[in-house]
Structures are given as C-alpha cells and as structure tokens.
C-alpha cells in the first residue's frame, strides 16, 4: 500500500537531517543529500514524494514490485542488487527496493509528475464529484479500464477495482455511461482503501483469516463466496498483468 509506505517514511525521516543518501540508479549515482533535512513524505495516488530542504523532492513509484522498508540505522552496508535507493538519518534507514521510478525534481515542479492525476482517494481533500465528472467524460469506456486510469481518480489498483465492482454488482466490461450510481462506486472504493491503509494485507470481506480476506481477487477458478459460480479472470484493455480483471459472472452480470 503506497499510503502506508509514505506514512512510514514520513514518521522515520521528517524533521531529521539525512546523514547519507545512496541512489543506485545511474542518473543519480553522484547525488548526495546528506546534511539536508527531510520536511515530509506524502503519497499522491501511487506516487511517493519525499520533500527535502532546498526545493528538492525525491519522487519514487513502486509500480508492481517495488517496496520501502524502514529499519534502525546502522549495521553492515546493504548490497542487495534489488535496492534502488537508501535514505538514512541517525535513527532510521529507509530502503527502497525494485522501485519503478526514482528521480529527483524541484519541489516547485512536482506537477510535472503528479499534476495529471485525478482526485486522490486517500487525499485530505478528496473531491468525489470531480472524480465522477472525469469518469463520465468517456461514457463508452468500460468501468474496469476507467477505474484504473489514474487521470480519473488516483489510487485504485487491480485489487480494489475487482473488489469494488464485485460489491457493487457491476461487470468490469459495463460501459461507464450505463452505470447510474457512479458516485456510489467511487465512495465504496474510497472506503475500502481507507479501511485498509494501515494494514499489511487487504481485507474486503470483513474476515481477516488467511484465504478468506477477498471476494474475487486472486480467486480465479474458485467458487464465488456468495453464489458458488466460478470466479473468472480475463484481460481487460492492454495485455498486461496489471490489467487482468476478476469477477463473478452471476453476481456481476454483463
């Protein structure tokens, strides 16, 4: 969860001077932020922005496989080839592995990387009306594709798309223009994200037991928890792993 990663980075780094920064990407191999204070870390959709004194922002994106880990400072140098960035102060060390994006930009120019995003579902000033307006701008597009378009609303990934549409009884292939209560879809997605933002795993069924946490995501070929129909899986939009849709054909009729 990107929000949780940003929150952990903020707690560990904000208000403290960096004693070292280790950028393990060629473009920033000589970048050194030691001696500068981190002011805050925030999430914007799936982006993480760590702001540093001097109009500097470290912009990272987890993509599919990235992660941040915070631990006590000190110990042996980390030589894992998956590490892309290490930011450390005297108390804490934040290690970013397999990050899809690592770049340094001016804080005053953050709009160049996140300005295109729609309303942030976990943002403090989330605008549901604006999210609905953006979704309705392409009425012929499938709701499954529209929800993953971060220009419409920021923060939904494949898990929350699958679970939100199941709970609303909507097929991922239904055109946006054929959905009457788009605001209800948006508000449910927001509630699911908010309820899980501090968890390591995701629970949408209300049951945190292993194997019982989700309705349809990761359950292709298994019986629906409501009706017993086999959960299906298919590509929706571009043939990428992150575009795979999961749904119950009976609970979410086309």
Image (cartoon, rainbow, N blue to C red):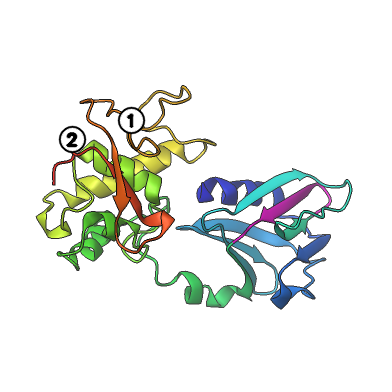
Above-or-below relation of 216 to 158: above
**Residue ID for mark 1:** 222
Percent coordinates x, y for residue 220 in the rendering: 34, 38
Point out the residue furthest to the right here. 76
Cα gap from disc 1 to disc 2, whole angstroms: 14 Å
Residue 148 belongs to the span the image colors magenta: no
Give the quadrant of residue 218. top left
Percent coordinates x, y for residue 126 in the rendering: 35, 54
Give the residue at x 38% y 52%.
156
Percent coordinates x, y for residue 207 in the rendering: 40, 23
Percent coordinates x, y for residue 124 in the rendering: 42, 52
**Crowding near pointer 1: few (<14 within 10 Å), some, many (20+)?**
some
Give the residue at x 39% y 66%.
117
Q: Is residue 130 left or right of residue 104?
A: left
Q: Is residue 34 left or right of residue 169?
A: right
**Residue ID for mark 2:** 251
Above-or-below relation of 249 to 21: above
Q: Which range is magenta?
A: 89-99
Please say whether residue 5 is visible from this viewpoint.
Answer: yes
Residue 92 belongs to the span the image colors magenta: yes
Point out the residue furthest to the front here. 221
Element at label 1: loop
């Amino acid at each position: 969860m990107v929000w949780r990663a940003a929150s952990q980075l903020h707690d560990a780094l904000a208000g403290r001077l960096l004693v070292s920064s280790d950028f393990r990407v060629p473009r920033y191999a000589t970048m050194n932020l030691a001696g500068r204070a981190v002011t805050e870390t925030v999430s914007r959709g799936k982006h993480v922005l760590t702001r540093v004194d001097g109009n500097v922002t470290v912009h990272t994106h987890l993509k599919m496989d990235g992660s941040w880990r915070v631990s006590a400072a000190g110990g042996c140098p980390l030589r894992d080839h998956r590490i892309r960035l290490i930011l450390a102060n005297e108390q804490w060390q934040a290690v970013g592995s397999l990050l899809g994006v690592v770049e340094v930009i001016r804080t005053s120019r953050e709009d160049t990387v996140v300005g295109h995003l729609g309303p942030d579902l976990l943002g403090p000033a989330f605008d549901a009306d604006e999210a609905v307006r953006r979704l309705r701008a392409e009425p012929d597009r499938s709701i499954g594709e529209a929800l993953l378009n971060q220009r419409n609303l920021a923060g939904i990934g494949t898990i929350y798309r699958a679970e939100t549409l199941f709970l609303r009884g909507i097929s991922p292939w239904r055109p946006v223009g054929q959905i009457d209560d788009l605001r209800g879809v948006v508000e449910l997605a927001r509630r699911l994200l908010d309820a899980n933002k501090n968890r390591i795993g995701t629970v949408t069924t209300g049951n945190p037991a292993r194997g019982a946490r989700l309705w349809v995501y990761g359950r292709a070929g298994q019986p629906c928890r409501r009706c017993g129909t086999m959960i299906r899986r298919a590509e929706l939009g571009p043939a990428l792993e992150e575009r795979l849709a999961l749904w119950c054909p009976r609970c979410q009729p086309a």
